[in-house]
Image (cartoon, rainbow, N blue to C red):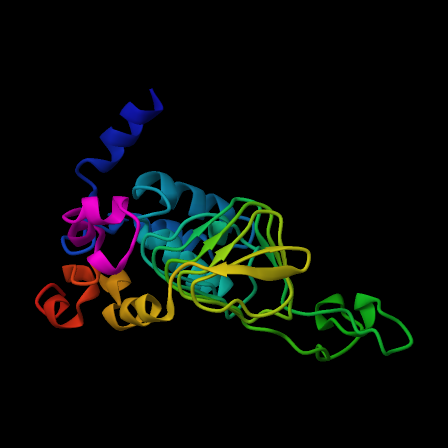
């Protein structure tokens, strides 16, 4: 029943961007305008996702997160990033990022070298001080990163690298390098996904800039382990990709 309602609402009223498949409901601007009311923001995001193809494709939900929460979310990324308050202002999340529904990131620590660690004395939102007086971290989650369920990201981490993997339940206390697999409490590097040569080939390719429609044409490539025999694939060749974008 819900699927039929969704289809009837969106079949003729949703604009789909031909290049990347991103979707925007004709009345999405109403949801965006309503989101300026703090209590309505979660509702606006929920219905934008419902009407615009979900987290992979919704344009309006991304606009709401950017303007109301100052969290930038790239195309096709999904997970806890669409929940208000999970990531702080200034967070940037790349394209094709996957994350669990219970991820949480923190931007500041309580001070440990002062008379009190209580938030009354460092958080201006609580009304006792004119300006917050502890340093804040601005987090960047790079393209194609995978953050597992129930991961906690502390202020000691400002970057989760390109193609990195953070194991479920990990406590991330420092930056995660590109293509690293980390896990534990505190999270430590367990291995790297690829050799240095393959890592650099991927960086130069910038394959994540390709829309899913282009990637889908090479689905067999994505289904196979990445080894040297695949380094001539079109998506890993910057020269060939100039004709794609």
Can you say which quadrant of the picture contains the N terminus? top left
Q: Is residue 111 visible?
A: yes
Which residue is drawn at the image coordinates 72% and 73% (left, top)? 124
Can you say which quadrant of the picture contains the C terminus? bottom left
Which residue is drawn at the image coordinates 74% and 71% (left, top)? 123
In front of the other: 95 or 221 = 221
Residue 228: x %, y % from top left: 25, 60
133 left or right of 59 in image:
right
State which region is magenta: 211-229
- Magenta span contains residue 217: yes
Q: In terms of image quadrants, where is residue 194?
A: bottom left
Residue 185: x %, y % from top left: 68, 56
Q: In terms of image quadrants, where is residue 73?
A: bottom left
Residue 222: x %, y % from top left: 25, 48
Which residue is drawn at the image coordinates 61% and 61% (left, top)? 188
Q: Is residue 29 visible?
A: no
186 left or right of 180 in image:
right
In front of the other: 111 or 214 = 214
Chief secondary structure of the magenta span?
helix
Q: Report the residue that reaches farthest toward the left.
A: 243
- Magenta span contains residue 213: yes
């Amino acid at each position: 029943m819900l699927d039929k309602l969704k289809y009837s609402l969106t079949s003729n009223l949703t604009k789909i961007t031909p290049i990347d498949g991103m979707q925007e409901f004709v009345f999405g601007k109403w949801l965006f305008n309503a989101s300026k009311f703090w209590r309505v923001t979660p509702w606006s995001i929920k219905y934008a996702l419902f009407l615009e193809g979900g987290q992979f494709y919704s344009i309006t939900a991304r606009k709401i997160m950017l303007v109301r929460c100052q969290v930038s979310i790239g195309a096709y990324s999904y997970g806890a990033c669409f929940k208000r308050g999970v990531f702080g202002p200034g967070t940037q999340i790349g394209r094709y990022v996957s994350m669990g529904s219970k991820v949480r990131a923190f931007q500041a620590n309580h001070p440990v070298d002062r008379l009190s660690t209580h938030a009354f004395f460092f958080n201006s939102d609580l009304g006792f001080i004119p300006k917050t007086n502890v340093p804040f971290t601005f987090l960047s989650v790079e393209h194609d990163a995978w953050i597992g369920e129930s991961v906690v990201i502390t202020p000691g981490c400002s970057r989760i690298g390109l193609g990195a993997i953070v194991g479920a339940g990990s406590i991330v206390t420092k930056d995660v390098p590109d293509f690293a697999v980390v896990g534990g409490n505190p999270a430590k590097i367990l291995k790297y996904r690829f050799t240095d040569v393959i890592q650099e080939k991927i960086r130069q390719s910038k394959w994540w800039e390709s829309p899913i429609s282009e990637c889908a044409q090479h689905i067999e490539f994505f289904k196979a382990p990445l080894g040297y025999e695949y380094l001539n694939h079109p998506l890993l060749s910057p020269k060939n990709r100039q004709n794609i974008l």
